[in-house]
Amino acid sequence: MTQELFVAEVTRTTRLTPGMVRVTFGGADLAAFTTTGIGDEFVRVRFPDASGHLRLPTLDEAGVWHEPEGDDSHIEPYTIRHHDRAAGEVTLDFVVHGHGKAGAWASAAAPGDRVAFNAPRGLYQPPTGAQTQLFVTDATGIPALARLAEQLPDGVQAVAAIEVAEASHRLDIGGERMQVEWIVGRGNGVGPSAITEALRAMPISAECYVWVAGEAGALRDARRYLRHERGLTPDRYDVIGYWRDRQEEWLEHYEALGTDTLTALAAIWESSDDHEQNRDRYESRLAELGL
Ligand SMILES: Cc1cc2nc3c(=O)[nH]c(=O)nc-3n(C[C@H](O)[C@H](O)[C@H](O)COP(=O)(O)OP(=O)(O)OC[C@H]3O[C@@H](n4cnc5c(N)ncnc54)[C@H](O)[C@@H]3O)c2cc1C
């Protein structure tokens, strides 16, 4: 059976920029970790609880996971920036944005600290033969983009735009394979996102593949542009919400919608229409509800 939960111990940390910290993990469990090989693969990282204990779910004999009682562990998705199979190490790069628990944990991480994560899953899925690939993201997508750039197939022409909060948050990524434009002072919780503007400036055609990741609210317009204004078919784009600005306010508003509205929203995903049609309906209903 594939191992489904890995306890990982910090071996070292490196400040890549004032806005990003790299954490490398080792430990006995990681000897069994396997990568999907997909550049944007990610895991759901379980951080220690409020008292500093890493509380783990347990697997019963029927193969069902059970969460520890009263568990308040914080769990967030992070990209596998690097997997070194020989060394049994996994590296994650964390944006340090000054608000959340995961970013704060990474800023203070020290050798011996532990987290746990599941097996990885990737979303980047260009159609065969997509020779032009376009990438737009904010700082949270830098780890995925850096790895996607390293793994680009021969002959692919790639263009990327990345918005960061400050000029000092730029990194040396892309190389000859990927032409990277940096947009400073936009998105990332410091200003309006420039993601759709960046897409509008790109050479989009029906044969290209477009990968977009970033703040969920900003991506609604980006997805609308690709799907409805440019008419890309769903196999030609992936638009992936990585985080949500002022998430606490958003969740408060969402939870206050009431059972009937929440049930109707959930039912949208049960329709037999394709996923992107359902997403159209879900996004437009959320917008009507002021979310
Ligand atoms: C598939 C996937 C892969 C991801 N890979 C990475 C990765 O490799 N590196 C990485 O850093 N992030 C990555 N993320 C995003 C990361 O999971 C979120 O930013 C997450 O919310 C951070 O958790 P937190 O505990 O720090 O903040 P939360 O507890 O989730 O949020 C607390 C507050 O911080 C704000 N906030 C959260 N993230 C940011 C941000 N980036 N900038 C500004 N404000 C923010 C929220 O709006 C909220 O108000 C990925 C997300 C997905 C879905």
Image (cartoon, rainbow, N blue to C red):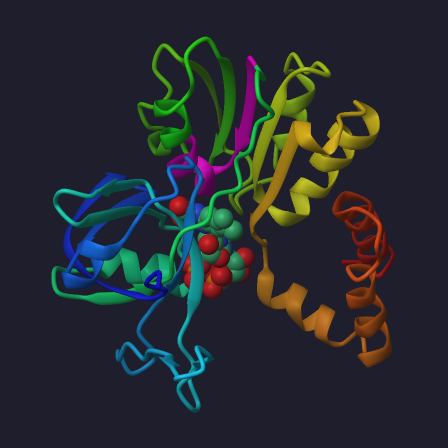
Quadrant including the N terminus? bottom left
Quadrant in which the C terminus appears = bottom right
Query: Percent position (x, y) of residue 32?
Result: 23, 56
Residue at position x 62%, y 36% in the image: 238
- Of residue 78 and residue 287, the one placed in the foreground of this image is 78
Q: Is residue 184 left or right of residue 287?
A: left
Question: Where 229 falls versus 262 (above or below)?
Answer: above
x, y percent for residue 44:
42, 60
Using the rendered image of the protein, determine whether residue 233 is visible from the camera's viewpoint. Answer: yes
Give the residues drawn in magenta, as a range.
131-145
In the displayed structure, would residue 28 be above or below residue 34?
A: below
Is 271 or 180 nearer to us in this picture?
Answer: 271
Specify whether 168 is left or right of 9: right
Examine the structure image and report whether residue 135 is included in the region drawn in magenta. Answer: yes
Corner quadrant of residue 26: bottom left
Picture residue at 44% right of the left edge, 39% below the top: 40
Q: Residue at x 41, y 12 (%)?
A: 154
